Amino acid sequence: MNINLTLIGQSITFALFVWFCMKFIWPPVMGALEARRKEIADGLAAAERGQHEQELAEKRAAEHIKEAKGQATDIITQAQKRASEIVEEAKGDARTEADRIVTGANAEIEQETNRAREQLRQEVVTLAIAGAEKVLKREVDKDAHASTLNDLATQL
């Protein structure tokens, strides 16, 4: 065996092997590598987009929280204002009710005063008649002297 012939045979076999690999093995391997490279690139791009979206979402959430705090402050302010209005209305109603009660009490006092005066007048008339009977030593006719007794009662 000649080394040259073996070397040529091995070279031809190697060339066939390289051709076979380049024709049938290399394209699917390169396609798989290219697909994997593209998949990794898409994944990195999606990660960047996701991170950007997350930052935007955080900003929007911060804005919503700020708006909600502002609305809550407005609602609290309105509630405090309404509470003050309710207290003032209640005070006004209480004053009105107190004035009504005082007016009613004054009217009742006036009525009681008039009743007491009338009762005193009748008692004075009765006492005056009793005194006059004793002084005159005879009975005084109430019906006959009614106008005189009424004048006396109004003077008292």
Image (tube, helix red, strand yellow):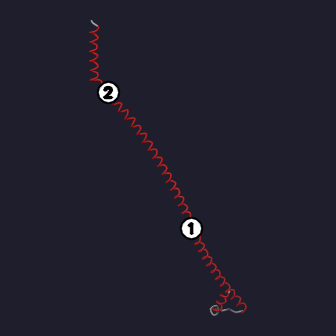
Residue 59 located left or right of residue 87 = left
Residue reaching furthest to the right? 135
Q: Under tag 1, what secondary structure? A: helix
Q: What's the mark number on residue 71?
A: none
User: Residue at 70% across / 92% down in the picture?
Assistant: 138
What x and y, as percent, mark residue 60?
45, 47
Q: Position of residue 85 (x, y in %)?
A: 54, 63
Question: Relative to 50, does residue 139 appear above or below in the rendering?
Answer: below
Q: Which residue is mark 1?
A: 92
Q: Residues within 10 Å of mark 1 (few under 14, many from 20)?
A: few
Q: Residues within 10 Å of mark 2 (few under 14, many from 20)?
A: few
Q: Residue at x 37, y 34 (%)?
A: 41
Quarter location, residue 44: top left
Residue 53 occupies which quadrant of the picture? top left
The amino acid at mark 2 is Met
Which image quadrant for residue 12? Answer: top left
Q: Is residue 21 above or below residue 99?
A: above
Amino acid tagged 1: Gly
In this rendering, would 20 be left or right of 99? left
Q: Residue at x 56, y 67 (%)?
A: 92
> Which residue is disc 2 drawn over?
30
Mark 2 and mark 1 in contact? Answer it, CB < 8 Å.
no
Quadrant of the rendering where the N terminus is positioned: top left
Considering only order in the chain, which callout, 1 or 2, is on the residue closer to the N terminus?
2
Dot 2 falls on a residue whose secondary structure is helix
As drawn, 59 above or below 103: above
On the image, the x and y values in percent for residue 129 come to 68, 89
Count of picture labels: 2
Q: Residues under labels 2 and 1: Cα distance?
A: 91 Å
